[in-house]
Image: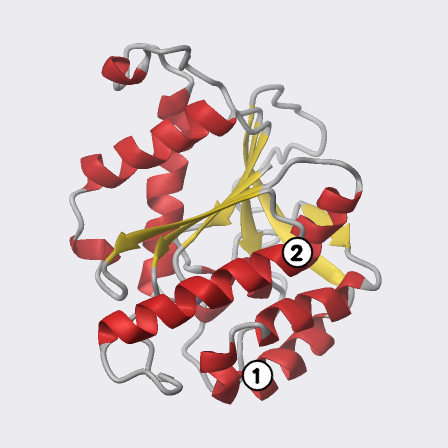
Amino acid sequence: MMAVTAHPDDEAGNFGGTLRLYSDRGVETSVICLTLGQAASNRGLAKSDRDLAEIRRAEFAASCQILGVCEPVILDYPDGQLHRQELNRVVYELTRHIRKFRPQVLLTYGADGGVTGHSDHSMAGIFATMAFHWAGRGHCYADQLENGVAAHRVKKLYYSTAEFPLPNRPPITFAPTTTVIDIGDHLETKIAAFKAHKSQSPLWTLFEENARKAGRRELFHLAAWTNVALSGAETDLLAGINKP
Ligand SMILES: [Zn+2]
């Protein structure tokens, strides 16, 4: 299982309970975080962006350890600027990671940007979605297919989703929940992993309140599946839209 995120702390905030739950079940997990989070407004004791990046790299490692992540990877794309990155470059790099780790399931955000609606989250999801599709096609980035690296078709793609937005924020149109993961007591593990991000301590209270409100559930939208099923399919594009 692999999660593609934007910032250190996303792995805990959006995917933490699920990552730990599946790790406990013996599933090998990886998190690919695209930025070092150096544009954060909460900066701890950091004196420069580079300082903050190094602090957050260590916090990411500590959080991933709590979550039982086998392969944590943090990349160095500019925080807050993912929408300005060359699409092909980022998708290429993610495709390479997918072809090497060979996950069966990929977790990321939808273009809504998840519960915070952050544009970096949207972009992480867009890059990861393309990499999900292209990793399985041998003619895409064929130069990667050497030294034992082969095309790899990930079986399922999920977007993190939610039932309610954060308070006092503009509205977010969430992807429908198709999959509810009962994270059980790992709600506490997830909160502990979030608090491994000590430089982000001003966010702890808001995060913990929201996490406890969501409870022992993490919600996902199944966006693609190699064995796509028709069960539950709608027969009317206007179904349900007049309901309040
Ligand atoms: Zn984030």
Left or right of 191 in this view: 44: left
- The quarter of the image that holds ligand 1 is bottom left
Question: To which residue does mark 1 refer?
Answer: 204
SS for dot 2: loop
Depicted 164 relative to depicted 96: above or below: below
Left or right of 84 in this view: 108: right
Q: Is mark 2 within 8 Å of ligand 1?
A: no
Res 67 label: 2
Left or right of 136 in this view: 235: right
Depicted 116 relative to depicted 110: above or below: below
Camera-nearest residue between 49 and 215: 49
The quarter of the rendered structure image containing the C terminus is: bottom right
Res 13 label: none
Camera-nearest residue between 125 and 31: 31
Give the amino acid at mark 2: Leu
- At x 40%, y 32%, the residue is 97
Give the amino acid at mark 1: Trp
What is the crowding at mark 2: few (fewer than 14 residues within 10 Å), some, or many (at least 20)? many
Q: Which picture quadrant has residue 204?
A: bottom right
Foreground label between 1 and 2: 2
- At x 55%, y 53%, the residue is 160
From the top left corner, tell me how far across and down residue 81 is, in percent.
Answer: 21, 61
For the residues marked 1 and 2, what is the alpha-carbon distance in whole angstroms? 17 Å
Left or right of 54 in this view: 17: right
SS for dot 1: helix
